[in-house]
Image (cartoon, helix red, strand yellow):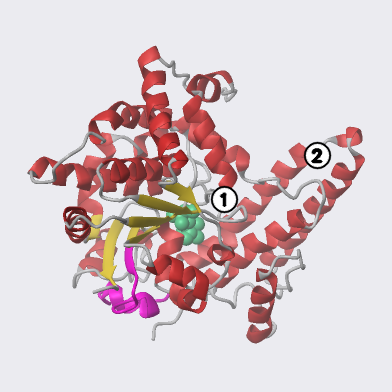
Amino acid sequence: MAEPYKNSDQNSFAFTSATKRWPVIITQAIDAVFRAIPGPSNELKTKEGRKIVEDLAKLKYELQHNRVLSPLRDDGLPDIAHYNDALVALGEAKWLEVSWLFSECYLYRRIATYFATTTQWNTFDVFLTSKLTTLRSSLPAILELAHRYSSITKPSTFTDETSSLLFHEIFLICLWGNATDLSLLTTLSYEDIQSLQGSHARKESEKNILANDLDKVYTLLTSLKTSGQKEIRVDIVLDNSGFELFVDLYLAGYLLSQGLATTIVLHPKNHPWFVSDVLPSDFAILLNALQDPVDFFITKNDNEHEIKHELKIEDSESIQDLFGSLATFHAEGKLSIRTNKYWTLQDPFWTLPEDKELWEDLKSSELVIYKGDLNYRKLTGDAAWPPTTPFHEALQTLGKGSGCRTLALRTCKADVVVGLDEGVDEKLRQEDKNNTGDQAKRSWAWHGKYAVMQFCDGKA
Ligand code: F6P
Ligand code: MG
């Protein structure tokens, strides 16, 4: 069995994350709280805010000085014991000694306890400002897609090549929507974000998909449709808000309107997570933005660095039509969100079957789509598998015969990768100019340039 990546491994992105990226993310959180402290107008909120800043500063100190991971403060939620029991089992574990996956989840869960144990800050999303900024900067790509929405949702027979091409393209849009992620791209400019989105970028990037099982998913969904099966449920375990959530909803709208799914269930997080992950409140924000695009994208956009866009009447109308379609699906009960504390545990998804209720629920779905890098790390235990390990093997309890179908749509932002053809990893290591010397690092896989779309039929 492969071992999970550890923060101490200097060749892995774990080390860079723990030593360089997390201190920056904590500092940004401190700034966000600091800026939101109201002052004398609300003494209690000010007092609690100062305490959060102090707690965050202490966390940063402990991380940077490789101290022992302390037990999480009890915020009354049931998963605290799960984390603290794991800490006890690890002994007096220090930041650089523990596994990357465990410590990164612990980091965000610990930050959440600081807010949850207050009376004035318990619904404060410490990463909200950066999420809003990126959503606003995604307007050109949102427009491009919104203009096409009515044509992609026209009923299709799926007997011709065009239908298949369209299916593949919508999934590619959904895949690459994951490339813009705030925890990784902390210094991204508007121009950078926009160049990662849009049809040109997608065409360019197709050659960077290293494993692609989409044909199997096309066959699955079209045959379920043609079999006349009444209920076809598809689940999406979400990753990031903003543009990625927009493309996830775009995919949902496409699948529902084509009858390739009759119900879509979306799974967000319960706490601010890995900076940009979707919270239930992010839905409301996105849907409101689509309902009144001028207000969100233009009137309320006070970012002086952005090249200001104008919205023509037909732009607003396209966005609002898209909103209308999604709102109707939601009102009809075909599009819903379902929260669960499981998604912010530190566990690899190999423990999903132990959560009986959630597992039974997921098994009643025809297809569970896991978006993004962190979900992929959890599917594979974030372990140092040989890169040619079959995907179903790395899934362990979620693999063959599990009763659940799994599709991972992931742009690579971490070391773990499985299901590659022989020699691919070696070739990419050689070509990677940042990886000099003995090519001991898999740095080609760290920055979202490459992707995998991997499927395992656990119902077969
Ligand atoms: O690799 C950087 C990183 O922050 C990882 O720690 C994490 O797995 C990932 O990016 C988050 O990306 P995503 O939003 O795609 O899960
Ligand atoms: Mg994320």
User: Relative to 394, does residue 204 appear above or below in the rendering?
Assistant: above
For the residue carrying disc 1, how many other residues have a C-alpha within 10 Å: few (<14), some (14-19), or many (20+)? many
Tell me, for residue 37, which label it has, or none.
2
Horizontal arrangement in the rendering, residue 381 relative to residue 367 (left or right): right
Horizontal arrangement in the rendering, residue 282 relative to residue 238 (left or right): right
User: What residue is shown at x 73% (from left), y 73% (from top)?
Assistant: 70
Under 8 Å from ligand 2: the CB of mark 1? yes
Report x, y in % for residue 4. Answer: 46, 77
* Residue type indicated by callout 1: Val
* Residue type indicated by callout 2: Ile
Report x, y in % for residue 237. Answer: 44, 57
Q: Quadrant of residue 153?
A: top left
Question: Front-most of 251 and 121?
Answer: 251
Q: Quadrant of the C terminus?
A: bottom left
Question: Front-most of 383 and 63?
Answer: 383
For the residue carrying disc 2, how many other residues have a C-alpha within 10 Å: few (<14), some (14-19), or many (20+)? some
User: What residue is shown at x 27% (from left), y 77% (from top)?
Assistant: 389
Report x, y in % for residue 7. Answer: 54, 71
Give how far apart the Cα atoms at labels 1 and 2 are: 20 Å
Question: Front-most of 32 and 447?
Answer: 32
Q: Which residue is mark 1?
A: 275
User: What residue is shown at x 23% (from left), y 30% (from top)?
Assistant: 151
Please give the range of residues in magenta.
Answer: 383-407
Tell me, for residue 367, which label it has, or none.
none
Horizontal arrangement in the rendering, residue 407 relative to residue 115 (left or right): left
Report x, y in % for residue 392. Answer: 29, 75
User: Can you see residue 126?
Assistant: yes
User: Can you see residue 11?
Assistant: no
User: Relative to 66, does residue 144 appear above or below in the rendering?
Assistant: above
